[in-house]
Image: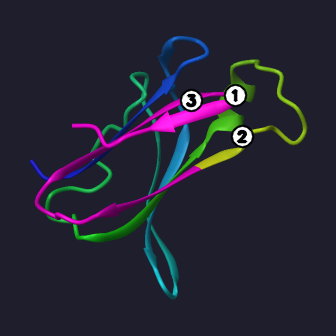
Amino acid sequence: MAGLTTHILDTSHGQPAADVALRLYRRSDVGDTLLVETRTNSDGRTDAPLLSAQDMTSGRYRLTFDVAAYFKARGVVLADPPFLDVVCIDFGVSDSTAHYHVPLLVSPFGYSTYRGS
């Protein structure tokens, strides 16, 4: 099943990160094009794939996650400015017929990602 999905896990609270604003951009030499703007559900996922199999094309993409707003809404006291405000993940899609899953594991002071399945 081709397409693009994401999943955000709050490692500081040990649970999915719900209601995180995120955006997906297609990158090019002339600038970025916003493709999707959405929020995560209670499971830390989006209700629909970010890109369906029909919309999936090879190229460069950027995912942005508004993590400082998420942590502030949970009552976490952050510095001003916060250490992590918006996490940006730039990645490439080389096989438009494959499924790409880009999870984000995040805390107020660090994050990691990988190509999932």
Circles 2, 1 touching at the beta carbon (< 8 Å): yes
* Residue 28 in the image: above or below residue 117: below
Give 90 or 19, whichever is nearer the viewer: 90
Label 1 sits on residue = 108
- Label 3 sits on residue: 106
Binning the other alpha carbons within 10 Å of mark 3 as few (below 14), some (14 to 19) or many (20 upward) gives many
The residue segment tinted magenta is 88-117
Q: Which residue is mark 2?
A: 84
Q: Main secondary structure of the magenta part?
A: strand
Q: Amino acid at mark 3?
A: Val
Q: Secondary structure at mark 2?
A: loop
State the CA–CA distance, disc 1 to disc 3: 7 Å
First reached walking from the N terminus: tag 2 or tag 1: 2
Does the CB distance between marks 2 and 3 fall below 8 Å?
A: yes
As measured in the structure, the alpha-carbon distance from the residue carrying label 2 to the one carrying label 3 is 10 Å
Q: Pick out the residue farthest to the bottom.
A: 30
Give the Cα separation between the discs numbered 2 and 1.
6 Å
- Of the residues under marks 2 and 3, which one precedes in the sequence? 2
